[in-house]
Amino acid sequence: MKQLKDWFVPWLMTAREYNVSILDKAWANPEYARLMLNENPIPPSEKVVNAVAEAVKSGHRYPDSMKRLRIKIGNMYGLGPDNVALCNGSSEIIDAMMRIFLQPGDEIIMSTPTFELFPPRAELCGGKAVQIPLREGDLQYDVDGMLNAINEKTKLILIINPNNPTGVFIDDADLERFCETGIPLCIDEAYRDYHPDHPSKAPLIEKYPQVFLSVTLSKAHGFAGIRFGYLLGTEEMVDAFNTMFLPWNVNLMSMAAAEAILDNPQEIEAKVQHNNRWMDIFYEELKKLGLKPFEAHGNYMLVDATMTGKTTEEILQSAIDMEKVFLKKIGEIHGKSGYFRVTPGTDEENERFVKFARRYFG
Ligand SMILES: Cc1ncc(COP(=O)(O)O)c(C=O)c1O
């Protein structure tokens, strides 16, 4: 008699896990500063809350594709409503793109480290994540290394811009080299709203129809728990994603929240200002302590503390013990332990982190 696991598709058992157990710990211990996730510490405004409350009154009806909201989003990029697919957070794009482009045995090229949800979602459809280490030193994408990894099995390439966990933008000329391959390319702009002076790469879809963009409201907009994201691409690309997404993938409340915040840009600006102010403070404080913080452009800062001789595990545990601060574990980079990542929280939480850093590294 077969065991249950013998009925599962083989890649279900072999795919890497995206571990979210830290979330249960964080919700159960609200006195701990959750600086380990790239969340926004500022809750939704009254405007968003009221819009959600209004939408829930129609909660007995299935949602439509909300053309009004797709027009609004399209206008932000000079695109039409049919160039926009709405989704339940951009993780849904990560999942759908693997199932749209990869058959078992096919490959997606990405960097390592990267946002850790990407490799498991490729592996869960039998695909292979080919991970090319970031360049030593500046930790930029190794463009030549990634291009050299292309073979007949390559069906997708991923560029996060600015990258996670480094927070650095890729040069336009380098990005264009990936576009020129003709291979489907996901440009993930989850964090671009923290630096809107860096224009979106959405115009690339006109010249390169195999390019698509992934955007989320989880970060600068603070909607990680509300769940809302969108894909930008040609109409053919948008149709493909809408075919793969479930119908009614975005609920009425999320769409109402998205519309309310996009109509209220001051709310986004205030959140961005809070973040960027603290990112500058972290950068200066950590540099003064002899560490190497990266000049990051999202809501997270990669810190190289390898020169201190402390391992990542020791640093993370000390932050918990000394100031009840959760930091993000970053695995070894080029064989070295001692990297971690920190995301600004509330003023009080950030002060606790700075206090920890001064006492621990000072
Ligand atoms: C690069 C990147 N893309 C996508 C996401 C997923 O965001 P969400 O599913 O909340 O939109 C994250 C979350 O941290 C991320 O870092």
Image (cartoon, helix red, strand yellow):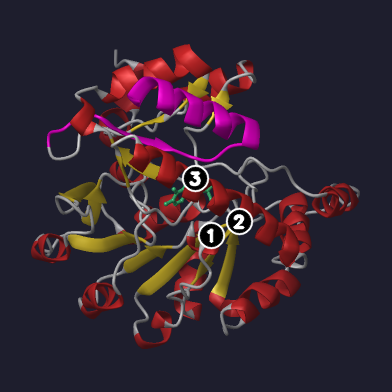
- Are there few (<14), some (14-19), or many (20+) residues within 10 Å of tag 2? many
Tag shown at residue 194 = 1
Q: From this view, report whether residue 22 is shown above or below residue 119.
A: above
Quarter of the rendering occupied by the N terminus: top left
Task: Indicate whether 356 appears above or below 134.
Answer: above
The picture places residue 256, in percent across and down from the top left corner, at: 78, 57
Q: Confirm or reject: label 3 Cβ below 8 Å from ligand 1.
A: no
Q: Which disc number belongs to residue 281?
A: 3
- Identify residue for label 2: 272
**Residue 217 in the figure: left or right of residue 188:** right
In the shown orientation, is residue 282 left or right of residue 183? Answer: right
Mark 1: is the Cβ under 8 angstroms from ligand 1?
Answer: no
Lower position in the chain sequence, tag 2 or tag 1: 1
Q: Quadrant of the C terminus?
A: top left
Amino acid type of the residue that numbered disc 3 sits on in the rendered structure: Ile
> Which residue is found at the position 74% from the left and 63% from the top?
266
Do callouts 2 and 1 mark residues in contact (Cβ within 8 Å)? yes
In the rendered structure, which segment of residues is drawn in magenta? 335-362
Disc nearer the start of the sequence (3/1): 1
Q: Where is residue 30 in the image (x, y as percent from the top left)?
A: 64, 20
Disc 3 secondary structure class? helix
Residue 154 belongs to the span the image colors magenta: no
SS at badge 2 = helix
Callout 3–callout 1 Cβ contact below 8 Å: no
As for residue 336 lying within the magenta part, the answer is: yes
| Amino acid at dot 1 | Tyr
Can you tell which of label 3 and label 2 is closer to the viewer?
3
Residue 337 location in percent, x, y?
A: 20, 29
Q: Nearer the viewer, residue 190 or 90?
A: 190
